[in-house]
Image: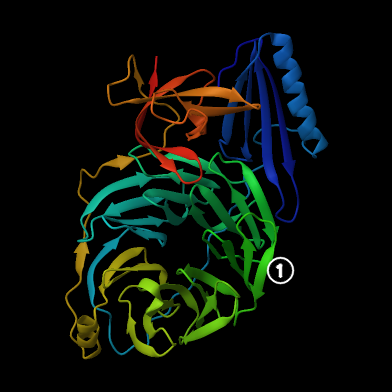
Amino acid sequence: MTQAASDITTYLELSQDGGGAHKFYEVTVSDTVVSVRYGRIGAAGQRQTSSFPTREKAQAAAARKIGEKVRKGYAPAVQGQRAARPVTHRQVTSAPSTAPAVAPVLWRFRTGASAFGIHIAEDRCWVGNQNGDVFTLGHDGEVLARYQLPEGVKCLVADDFWIYAGCDDGTVYDLSSKLPFAAYDIAPDVDIFWLDIREGILNVSDRGGGLTVIDHEDEYQWSRRSGGEHAWMVRRDEHAVYHGHRLGVTAYRADGSGELWHTPTRGAVLFGWQEDRAVYAGTDKRVVQRLAKDSGAVEATYACDSVVYSCATALDGRHVFAGDSASSVYCFAADGTRLWKLGTGGGSALSMQYLDEKLYMVTTDGSLVCVDASDAAIAAARSGTVPVARDVKSAAALPTYTPSATVQTVSSAAASGIVVECVQESGRLRVHVVSEGYEPSWNVQFPRQIRRPGARYVVEDLSASAGGFYRVRGEIRQLV
């Protein structure tokens, strides 16, 4: 970035040994404007900008910000001397299946890298891989679009019709419109393992066994440290957050006010699923266990033949599915009776989801596969009759969307456009709706990297969330 001669920049870092904090904080005073940039060392980070009536007041505000960070242990540093700390990539192995038959795979899409993220909506499928690619496909396997995000898409989570992708760099992107934007930025010292989201409240489980809860404005709410490390499971409903880690599953009140229960599981938890009245924990001791949400009691156990990498259920848990480290997929009755075991036909399933008698899985070889899970298809597969899986290819001119820190400008709002404005509120830059017919006091979940004090933007649509805020649907343009 080119700076004017009068600009004053202070760059600080906090780097702790043993996997602790590794982050930077940079303050630049340019006349009456104070810009703050912060994030993980080695990353671009986030930027916030504030304006002040005079240069003296801007310098005083900057000094206060610097002083706060110094008191927390930050120290002056030279940018670039410390390297970015490597993030955790889930290390998995995959052995050949021992099942006597292969599942009836209808179609297969090879994403090009090991894939963890999956979400199956009513109208399309989403898959994300370690290269940072997120693809959307129709239920028939047609590839519709591609999003190019930073390397390492950990998981895909849905909140009503909003879709979010969590990446290894600690950023969570909203993919609900054509332009993906950074909706949440996790604290630089949190090594994300898994995410869940409900009504704009993001829940993050991490390598150290921590649980962090962040609101729709990307502001910290509360956190807890569970007894076990490597927390690969987090699920949330209106009553609680269910956190699965090396020592079992712990349930916390949704507001963070206390622990509801803790249940040791048979082995370390590697994956989690939920239904209305139960949570399901897949473990490294070859089982999936069903726990009652109200008490944590183990209600059923589903025994597999290898380490369980993923699990899912049919509606209300009438069937339970599991994927193991030996490239097999299982189906159980609700009481734990094994109904079938079949090979996946393409690696071990790292995540899965069931919809309308089809089981969708993402695997260690980077494939999204669609399995016909109807009784008739499975019976035929067990007798050796399976369809020929169709290999899906991307179109040469596939639309590709990437995050951007800039937006197009317009001179006026179309009749259907909704105008929002950036305003300073309690020391933070918020976004409120200007157009009539909306609650003016509600905040709008809006990309932080494009917020500017006093700026107005035009959005195609806004949807109200039960949490008392608005979310953007459609493109964003700056009004000039």
Residue 396, how many percent across, how many down? 20, 46
Residue 165, how many percent across, how many down? 44, 50
Q: Looking at the picture, which amino acid does disc 1 mark?
A: Gly
Residue 47 placement, left or right of 17: left
Q: Quick check: 211 above or below 328?
A: above
Visible residue check, residue 307:
yes
Q: Which residue is mark 1?
A: 227
Q: Report the residue at 63% width, 49% height from top.
A: 85
Farthest residue, direction right: 71
Visible residue check, residue 283:
no
| Tally of numbered tags | 1
- Foreground: 380 or 332? 332
Q: Report the residue at 59% width, 16% height from top.
A: 3
Question: What secondary structure is marked by label 1?
Answer: loop
Q: Report the residue at 33% width, 81% height from top.
A: 343
Q: Name the image quarter holding the N terminus.
A: top right
Residue 382, how many percent across, how many down? 25, 89
Q: Quick check: 378 above or below 240?
A: below
Q: Which quadrant would residue 193 be assigned to in this image? A: bottom right
Q: Quick check: 101 above or below 150?
A: below
Q: Quick check: 371 above or below 198?
A: below
| Neighbour tally class for label 1: few under 14, some 14-19, many 20 plus, Cα within 10 Å | some
Residue 412 placement, left or right of 324: left
The colour style of the image is rainbow
Q: Which quadrant would residue 71 be assigned to in this image? A: top right
- Foreground: 286 or 411? 411
Residue 225, how many percent across, how many down? 70, 61
Q: Name the image quarter holding the C terminus.
A: top left
